[in-house]
Image: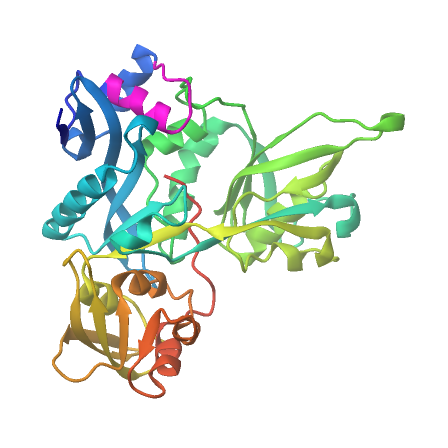
């Protein structure tokens, strides 16, 4: 029997969710109320399934997103999510059929990039995606960190406030949007995401524990940071507390807010370990501690992957810290964004257009995705054989133009 790839109807959506849960090794049951709620937050024209007779054996969804580029300009993005193939139908090209069709539609729609969070590293490079941001997680030994347990609050005139999740639901989106306006790599967060992380909506698929919620307000009363965390209840021999605080959400708009929130968390009574949650690899956390060795790196992995669909818009929308000219030859196996482009960049702006002159650098479109947010070194990619330096010195010039002083960061998993 042939396998049919098509969009999913409203009546088929609960079965699509069951197939999704099967792919992610979750119990394949879905409550009618949860299915109805989730249906209200999806565009069915962008929800695809593979049908084997009457059974859905693969799932795929995309949705509209904004990605903050270098310098703060928002880029229209096609966010790819909820991709699964049932164990009975692997290695039949089902993902290729779904993703190539979706990327072609996104290109035609005018999206500059596509984005995703990869569950497995080796899958998406062959479709032109490259890892553009990385994530780090630390476990802080509070007893060794050197934070005075008598810490009583910020010294800059700001204040720490314990609030409930209703206040986080009200205040958090504005903090997130302000962060997104200034931090490259941040993506827009959906309404349903805020509802789930604050417990405004409860679903069996997302077990919820009410977190502790904290805001940092500056001396002027402006909210400049938010933190939510949970804590376990573990005691050792001789009644010694051995509790771990686990960060669920941490957004800081200023170094003062970041310092105050970390110092607060590391001074909570009975907490002996703080797990930071995913942070940028160059996060301030370790160096905010009197003893940075107290922060042990426990995770360092790829986070946001970017697939460039419009090289001209990507390169013209970002800022540059220096002036220079490069001709890039981009190979694209899907035929969506390949070609030769001349980039003329300067701090005041940039122009990018198709070119006919000899290239300075030759690369696959996935490598441009990896370079798109300023995190990777072209010189390093040349050494790895992933970029060809056709003109001497072009890689070093590209690093001068493309790399950023702080690393990009994506705080959202979608």
Tell whether 381 sits left or right of 106: right
Residue at x-position 38% and y-position 45%: 118
Q: Residue at x 50, y 54 (%)?
A: 280
Residue 284: name its quadrant. Answer: bottom right
Tell whether 86 sits left or right of 228.
left
Closer-to-camera residue (359/319) = 359
The percent position of residue 11, horizontal first and vertical second, equals 17, 15
Q: Residue furthest bottom?
A: 392
Image quarter (top left, top right, bottom left or bottom right) of the N terminus: top left
The color scheme shown is: rainbow
- Which residue does the image show at 26% across and 82% down from the upper left? 360
Between residue 307 and residue 231, name the one nearer to us. Answer: 307
Residue 315 seen in this snapshot: yes
Q: Is residue 355 above or below residue 253?
A: below
Q: Which residue ends up furthest to the front in the rendered image? A: 1
Counting every numbered tag in the picture gives 0
Q: Nearer the viewer, residue 97 or 301?
A: 97
| Side of 183 where 230 appears, left or right | right
The magenta stretch spans residue 176 = no
Height in image: 351 above or below 244? below
Q: Is residue 6 left or right of residue 192?
A: left
Q: Furthest residue to the top? A: 32
Q: Residue furthest right?
A: 238
Quarter of the image where the C terminus is located:
top left
List x then y, in percent, for residue 401: 35, 77
> x, y percentage for residue 300?
54, 52
Residues rendered magenta in the picture: 14-30
Q: Measured from the top left, where is residue 246 in percent x and y? A: 60, 36
The relative height of residue 292 versus residue 173 in the rendered view (above or below) is below
189 to 207, vertically: above or below: below
Q: Tell me if residue 151 can be seen.
A: no
């Amino acid at each position: 029997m042939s396998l049919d790839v098509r969009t999913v109807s409203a009546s088929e959506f609960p079965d699509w969710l069951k197939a999704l849960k099967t792919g992610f090794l979750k119990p394949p049951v879905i409550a009618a109320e949860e299915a109805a709620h989730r249906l209200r937050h999806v565009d069915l024209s962008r929800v695809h399934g593979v049908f084997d007779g009457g059974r859905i054996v693969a799932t795929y969804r995309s949705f509209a997103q904004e990605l903050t580029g270098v310098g703060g300009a928002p880029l229209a993005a096609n966010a790819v999510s909820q991709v699964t193939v049932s164990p009975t139908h692997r290695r039949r090209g089902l993902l290729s059929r779904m993703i190539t069709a979706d990327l072609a539609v996104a290109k035609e729609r005018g999206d500059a990039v596509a984005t995703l969070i990869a569950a497995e590293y080796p899958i998406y490079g062959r479709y032109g995606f490259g890892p553009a941001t990385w994530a780090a997680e630390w476990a802080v030994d509070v007893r060794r960190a050197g934070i005075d347990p008598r810490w009583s609050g910020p010294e800059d005139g700001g204040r720490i406030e314990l609030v409930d999740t209703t206040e986080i639901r009200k205040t958090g989106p504005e903090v997130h949007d302000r962060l997104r306006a200034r931090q490259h790599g941040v993506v827009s967060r959906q309404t349903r995401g805020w509802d789930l992380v604050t417990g405004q909506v409860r679903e069996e698929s997302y077990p919820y524990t009410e977190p502790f919620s904290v805001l940092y307000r500056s001396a002027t009363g402006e909210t400049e940071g938010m933190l939510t965390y949970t804590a376990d209840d573990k005691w050792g021999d001789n009644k010694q507390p051995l509790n771990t605080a686990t960060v669920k959400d941490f957004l800081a708009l200023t170094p003062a807010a970041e310092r105050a929130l970390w110092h607060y968390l590391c001074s909570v009574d009975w907490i002996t370990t703080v797990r930071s949650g995913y942070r940028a690899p160059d996060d301030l956390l370790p160096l905010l501690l009197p003893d940075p060795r107290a922060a042990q790196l426990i995770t360092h992995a790829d986070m946001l992957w970017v697939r460039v669909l419009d090289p001209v818009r990507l390169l013209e929308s970002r800022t540059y810290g220096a002036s220079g000219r490069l001709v890039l030859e981009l190979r694209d196996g899907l035929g969506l964004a390949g070609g030769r482009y001349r980039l003329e960049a300067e701090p005041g702006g940039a122009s990018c257009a198709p070119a006919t002159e000899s290239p300075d650098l030759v690369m696959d479109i996935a490598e441009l995705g990896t370079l798109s947010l300023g995190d990777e070194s072209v010189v390093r990619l040349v050494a790895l054989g992933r970029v060809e330096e056709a003109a001497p010195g072009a890689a070093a010039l590209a690093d001068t133009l493309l790399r950023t002083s702080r690393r990009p960061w994506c705080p959202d998993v979608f």
